[in-house]
Amino acid sequence: MAELIIYTDGASRGNPGPGGYGVILMWGNVRKELSQGYRKTTNNRMELLAVITGLEVLTREGLDITVYTDSKYVVDSIEKGWIWGWVKTGFKDKKNKDLWMRFIPLYRKHKVKMNWVKGHASNPFNNRCDELATQAADSGNWLIDTGFESGNG
């Protein structure tokens, strides 16, 4: 079975400010792009939401998935296991609990490997995700990041 490759990026115009994410899913020769903007959010929330969105659209479980992102926040939280310590403490004094709690069951459905890539460099897929994210942030076609705006994030 082929490996699913997911590239993600998040953007925020101000932190907080209007933001967006961009996602590219690649399965063999099939490629799908996703993006969405939010009226008020943060960069870290958009980076994490991009990964969540990439996993949420999947219709199968048990996939081998490699996620590429330029977010050290997301990669280190997962690959260094910080997230599991946060779960044990109920995310005490941690931001974005709502998104991490949305991420965990998705992560557990698959074999996910996180890889950091340098942002704004020579990786064409990361650059395309950046374009998608910034276009979504600038679009004015925004959803409400209820987790952030309600203060529960």
Image (cartoon, rainbow, N blue to C red):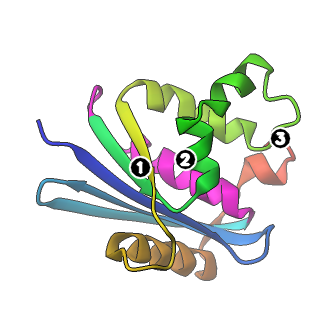
Name the kind of residue labelled 1 in the image. Answer: Gly
What residue does disc 2 label? 75
Residue at the spot x=79%, y=22% of the render? 90
What residue does disc 1 label? 54
* Residue 3 found in image quarter: top left
Rounded to the nearest angstrom, the CA distance separating label 1 from label 3 is 23 Å
Closer to the observer: label 2 or label 1?
2
**Which of pointers 1 and 3 lies earlier in the amino acid sequence?**
1
**Which of pointers 2 and 1 lies earlier in the amino acid sequence?**
1
Give, as a single range, the part of the protein colored magenta.
Answer: 41-63
Where residue 76 sits in the image (x, y, percent)?
60, 44
Name the kind of residue labelled 3 in the image. Answer: Asn
- The reply to whether residue 59 is visible in this rendering is no
Mark 3 packing: few (<14 Cα in 10 Å), some, or many (20+)?
few
Tell whether 10 sits left or right of 7: right
Name the kind of residue labelled 2 in the image. Answer: Val
Q: Where is the N terminus found, in terms of image quarters?
A: top left
Residue 16, placed above or below residue 44: below
Rounded to the nearest angstrom, the CA distance separating label 2 from label 1 is 15 Å
Rounded to the nearest angstrom, the CA distance separating label 2 from label 3 is 23 Å
Do callouts 2 and 3 mark residues in contact (Cβ within 8 Å)? no
Residue 152 is tagged as 3
Residue at the spot x=60%, y=30% of the render? 81
